[in-house]
Image: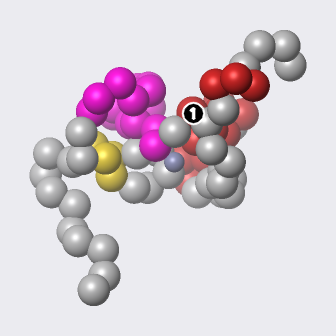
Amino acid sequence: MLFSEPKRNDLMTACGGFLREEGDRVSVEFRGRRVYFCRLACYRAYLTDPERFMKGAIPHPLEEDDESASGSA
Ligand SMILES: [Zn+2]
């Protein structure tokens, strides 16, 4: 069985996926369209270069969110 088709009310993510529920996901407005991020790492990748990320030119991050790692960079 393949992926089920997205429903109309599913939320589009910047990385080309869909979310079933809005929850507390991070979202931004990109060219008049609301896009969501599947995880914080996804959002960070978007921030590095929004245009390229939305085109799929930047590989989707595989890292998991790590709240404890936030802080000094
Ligand atoms: Zn993502």
Report the side of 39 relative to 73 (left or right).
left
Residue at 40 percent of width and 45 percent of height:
13
**Who is closer to the viewer here, 69 or 19?**
69
Amino acid type assigned to the residue bearing label 1 in the image: Leu
Instruction: Tell which residue pokes out farthest to the bottom in this image.
Output: 1
Residue 65 on the magenta span: no
Instruction: Tell which residue pokes out farthest to the right in this image.
Output: 73
Instruction: Tell which residue pokes out farthest to the top in this image.
Output: 72
Which residues make up the magenta segment? 22-38
> Where on the picture, by quarter, is residue 73?
top right
> How far from the left and from the top, in percent, is residue 70?
72, 20
Instruction: Tell which residue pokes out farthest to the left in this image.
Output: 8
The N terminus, quarter of image: bottom left
Residue at 70 percent of width and 23 percent of height:
68
Report the side of 41 relative to 33 (left or right).
right
**Who is closer to the viewer here, 18 or 64?**
64
> How far from the left and from the top, in percent, is residue 58?
68, 53
Q: From the image, tell me which residue sits under label 1.
A: 40
> How far from the left and from the top, in percent, is residue 45?
66, 39
Report the side of 58 relative to 12 (left or right).
right
**Who is closer to the viewer here, 65 or 52?**
65
